[in-house]
Image: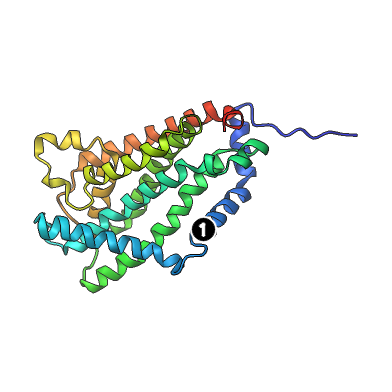
Amino acid sequence: MSELVIESGRIERQYWRDLWRYRELFLFFVWRDLLVRYKQTAVGVSWSLIRPFLTLAVLTIVFGKLGKMPAGGVPYPLLVFCGMLPWLFFSTALTEAGNSLVSNANMVSKVYFPRMTITASSVSTCLVDFMISCVFLIALMIWFRFLPPVAVFLVPFFVVLMFGASLGVSLWVAALMVKYRDFRFIVPFVVQFGLYISPVGFQSSVVPERFRLLYALNPMVGIIDGFRWCILGLPQAYLPSIGIATVEVGLLLASGVWYFRKTERTFADII
């Protein structure tokens, strides 16, 4: 009687083949997360619009009305919302994907499949919310009769950067959270703190020139600046921040995959 033994890929090439073989499982995880997220909620998927709308209202009042931040000649709600889109994606992905392995402990400890599938699917689920929120952005632009510049066709590049940054950081956090559950308390603090050090409710041009390069070390600065440049045509985008963000996203993604793979074999024992 023959026996089938399923084990993880011992070499990287075999592991990446496993990821492709389990692509249907990846799609299943994405679909499951979407269903679970809005299950038994009163307004369902409308939360993808309600949440950014409420955040937009608060940031517009705090930074626009009370803080008197410059808008660069564009309606302030548009300025804020273009900064919120990538930030909400990043913060939601970090919160949910970072906890993805612990939330699926039963599967991780009993069945073999590339564990990266779970974390990547959580980040991909947030991409659906992002696309729904983009509908609200289009509605805002129609309301303010704002026509985007030709550079709007470069938006997919910054979407890729946004996704890469979120996935890279999420791989680090997900792997670390398996061993150090303290990250459950650290991640919400980082997300809250990051909102204020990223140019979500204001332009990065308000940062003094001598600190701009240091400020640009936050990869979300370049990504948010890029979004606003593509959609609103703001000339105040600090171009070095976009280059720095591109390099940092590559490093985050490569190091995240490396650390995740390094620790993946221990997940089933620890979790």
Where is mark 1, residue-wise?
Answer: 34
Query: Could you tell me the amino acid type at mark 1?
Result: Leu
The colour mode here is rainbow
**Closer-to-camera residue (60/252):** 60
Q: In which quadrant of the rendered image does the C terminus lie? A: top right
Q: Residue at x 46, y 48 (%)?
A: 123
Q: Residue at x 69, y 31 (%)?
A: 7
Q: Residue at x 17, y 46 (%)?
A: 204
Q: Residue at x 24, y 43 (%)?
A: 221
**Closer-to-camera residue (221/153):** 221
**Where 238 falls versus 175 (above or below)?**
below
Spot occupied by residue 65 in the image (x, y as percentages of width and height): 11, 60
**Closer-to-camera residue (26/97):** 97
Circle 1 crowding by C-alpha within 10 Å: few under 14, some 14–19, many from 20: some
| Residue 158 visible in image | yes
**Mark 1, secondary structure of its residue:** helix
Extreme residue toward the right, this view: 1
Residue 175 relative to residue 160: left or right? right
Spot occupied by residue 229 in the image (x, y as percentages of width and height): 22, 53
For residue 20, which quarter of the picture? top right
Q: How many marks?
A: 1
**Where 13 falls versus 79 (above or below)?**
above
Spot occupied by residue 165 in the image (x, y as percentages of width and height): 37, 41
Residue 174 relative to residue 134: left or right? right
**Where 177 falls versus 30 (above or below)?**
above
| Residue 149 visible in image | no
Residue 252 relative to residue 5: left or right? left
Spot occupied by residue 24 in the image (x, y as percentages of width and height): 63, 51
